Image (cartoon, rainbow, N blue to C red):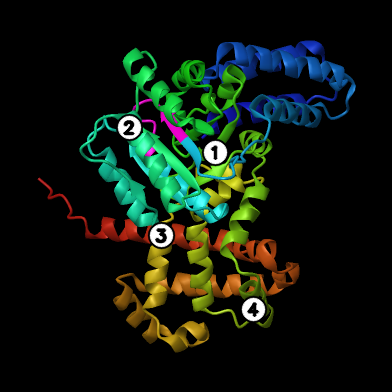
Amino acid sequence: MFDALTDKFNSVFKSLSGRGRITESNVSDAMREVRKALLEADVNYQVAKQFCKDVKDAAVGAEVLKSLHPGQVMVKIVNDELTHLMGPVDPKIYYVSPGPTIIMLAGLQGSGKTTTAGKLAKYIKEKNNKNPLLVADDLQRPAAIEQLCTLGEQLGIEVYKEDSVKDAVKVAKNALKHARKNGFDVIVLDTAGRLHVDMEMMDEIAAVAKAVTPQQIYLVCDAMTGQDAVNSAKEFNDRLELDGVILTKLDGDARGGSALSVKAVTGKPIKFIGVGEKLDNIEEFHPDRMASRILGMGDVVTLVEKAQEQFDEVQAQKMQAKMAKGTFGFDDFLKQMQSLKKMGGMSSMLKLLPGMGALKDMDFDDREINKIEGIVHSMTVYERTDPDILDSSRRRRIARGSGRDVQDVAGLVKTFKRSREMMKMMAGGGSGGLGALKNMFSGKTDMMSTMSSMKKQKQRSKRKRAPRKKRR
């Protein structure tokens, strides 16, 4: 997401930083390019226009024109204005006592409400230590109830449903009675998707809201619909008085315009963002972190939070001790890679690292990690502990067992040994989430090189096996 917008911002900053001093005319030209980029990203026209005006006013007011480093000052100003545009920070869910707290999800058809309901319930259960109840109140879409029940079964969260009832208001009322009777803390109400121009359907969701008086009403918007998501948000807000917005599919090819426009147009904060298909791929929305990502400066805070969720403090200290002694083995290597996969994979992590923008176009396939796991699993326990004993005979056996080429095994062993030496050197960088994260990424270049070489070797093998065309 935001790749095109990030490239445009970086191009503008680069043009400004190449000048000893700049003029007001230069700033105007730069903002013209920024406005064009914002509009191409499907940002609301009035929002883009006002944003560029605010940046220009701030630039002149901050005496950027007299600065010796105008490009750097402009980055700071644009970052602040982006944060202000998408802010303030408000990811908190406000619970009531006594419960249950009712959270109603609304949105257009196909916006991802049902999946988001499951993600949100999982978040509430794990992050806030609450006992949520999912309510299947989408009585319009075929298989919507079955989908929510499947999600509830995967998450271990109860789903309230009434197969024979077609009255959404009645189902919501009965679900509230069930939650109160059985001691649920939170109700996540999944409603039917509707078009904001469908008055009958809009009347229905307004009636549901009136009947159960939810404490929180979140609009679920598909970020890939761009400006349409913002327009629908305004219509839903007029009917329901929203408390916040959840943007879905921000991991796709979204142009990002809705993320920059929805707060300015509706006045409602973005609460959460969906960044993948898995049920834990939901994040709290932090405007300052998103602004940093848009400007290509990464998001180290989110990266460290993800690492701290996956790395136990005691285990991290043990791992660091092994690195310092040089006894780091393939089993430890596998644990690091599995933690990396849980954090979203290497491609996802690179986007959060500052200065890694140049690698975004690299053909990096996280599935290559599975191939490396296959090689390691084909080793004996002794071989995993002491990779130095892996002679040519053992490598051939491992290659046969994993279905890979001997060159792949040799390349992995070579990379592992080099990475182990690097980790040994860097083991003094501190333990815990950040220290483990630092160690884990210390060999990222070698790991990427290994995967790339494995992919190239596979392509060469295919070319060798390809039948030659007969000469006429």
Residue matched to label 2: 170
- Nearer the camera: disc 3 or disc 1: 1
Is 448 covered by the magenta stretch? Answer: no
Residue 217 x, y percent position in the rendering: 50, 30
Query: Which residues lie in the magenta part?
Result: 104-116
Answer left or right for 290 relative to 234: right
Give residue 362's position: percent from left, percent from top.
49, 46
Q: CA distance from mark 2 to mark 3?
A: 50 Å
Mark 2 touches mark 3? (CB < 8 Å): no
Residue at position x 67%, y 83% in the image: 325
Q: Nearer the viewer, residue 204 or 337?
A: 204
- Residue 247 position, x and y percent, is 49, 33
Tell me the residue that label 1 is attached to.
Answer: 272
Q: CA distance from mark 4 to mark 2?
A: 56 Å
Q: Are marks 1 and 4 in contact (CB under 8 Å)?
A: no
Which label sits in the foreground, 2 or 3? Answer: 2
Looking at the image, tell me whether mark 1 or mark 4 is earlier in sequence order.
Answer: 1
The amino acid type found where label 3 is placed reads Glu
Which image quarter: residue 292? top right
Which type of secondary structure does the marked residue at label 4 adopt? helix
| Left or right: 439 in relation to 467 | right
* Mark 2: few/some/many CA within 10 Å (<14, 14-19, 20+): some
Q: Which residue is mark 3?
A: 368
| N-term-proximal mark, 2 vs 3 | 2
Element carrying mark 1? strand
In the shown orientation, is residue 129 left or right of residue 24? left
Q: CA distance from mark 3 to mark 1?
A: 30 Å
Asked whether disc 2 touches disc 1, contact meaning CB atoms under 8 Å apart, the reply is no
Where residue 197 sits: x, y (%)? 37, 13
Residue position for label 4: 318
